Amino acid sequence: MDHEKIKRINELAKKQRTTGLTPAEVEEQKALRQEYLADFRKGMEAMLEGVVIKRPDGTMEKLKKKSEMH
């Protein structure tokens, strides 16, 4: 997500706390937040895919998704 969109999220949050938002601004805020969360989750998942666990016996194992463990 680019810097301008994050700036807009913060502007809308500040306005919401002070004067309130119009219905159009509420929808804009909701869409921007959903986009931000999707980008955040994508980045976090990419980071976790690179995590490697070193076991006490020296072996290296990639981190597994919870759904893959059972």
Image (cartoon, helix red, strand yellow):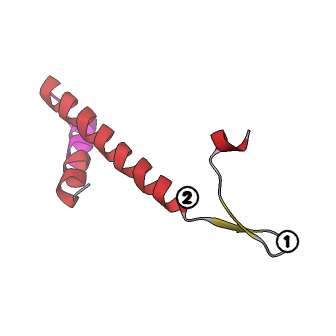
For the residue pair 14 and 38, the one nearer the viewer reads as: 38
Query: Which residue is painted at 36% across and 44% down in the image?
Result: 38
Residue labelled with disc 1: 56
Query: Which residue is painted at 47% across and 55% down in the image?
Result: 44
Residue that sits furthest to the bottom in the current view: 58
Q: Residue 24 appears at what percent x and percent y? A: 13, 27
Q: Specify the principal SS of the magenta part.
A: helix
In the rendered image, residue 69 lying in the magenta stretch gets the answer: no
Q: Quadrant of residue 2?
A: bottom left
Q: In the image, is residue 33 above or below residue 2? A: above
Residue that sits furthest to the right in the current view: 57
Amino acid found under the numbered disc labelled 2: Leu
The CA span between labels 1 and 2 is 21 Å
Q: In the image, is residue 46 above or below residue 37? A: below
Query: Which residue is painted at 24% across and 35% down in the image?
Result: 31
Q: Residue 37 appears at what percent x and percent y? A: 37, 44
Q: Quadrant of the C terminus?
A: top right
- Circle 2 — which element? helix
Residue labelled with disc 2: 48
- Circle 1 — which element? loop
Q: From the viewer's perspective, tell me whether residue 17 is left or right of residue 49.
A: left
- Residue 55 makes an appearance in the image: yes
For the residue pair 53 and 16, the one nearer the viewer reads as: 53
Q: From the viewer's perspective, tell me whether residue 41 is left or right of residue 6.
A: right
Q: Residue 39 appears at what percent x and percent y? A: 35, 50
Q: Quadrant of residue 14?
A: top left
Amino acid found under the numbered disc labelled 1: Pro
Task: Give the extent of the magenta segment.
Answer: 11-22
Q: In the image, is residue 21 above or below residue 40? A: above
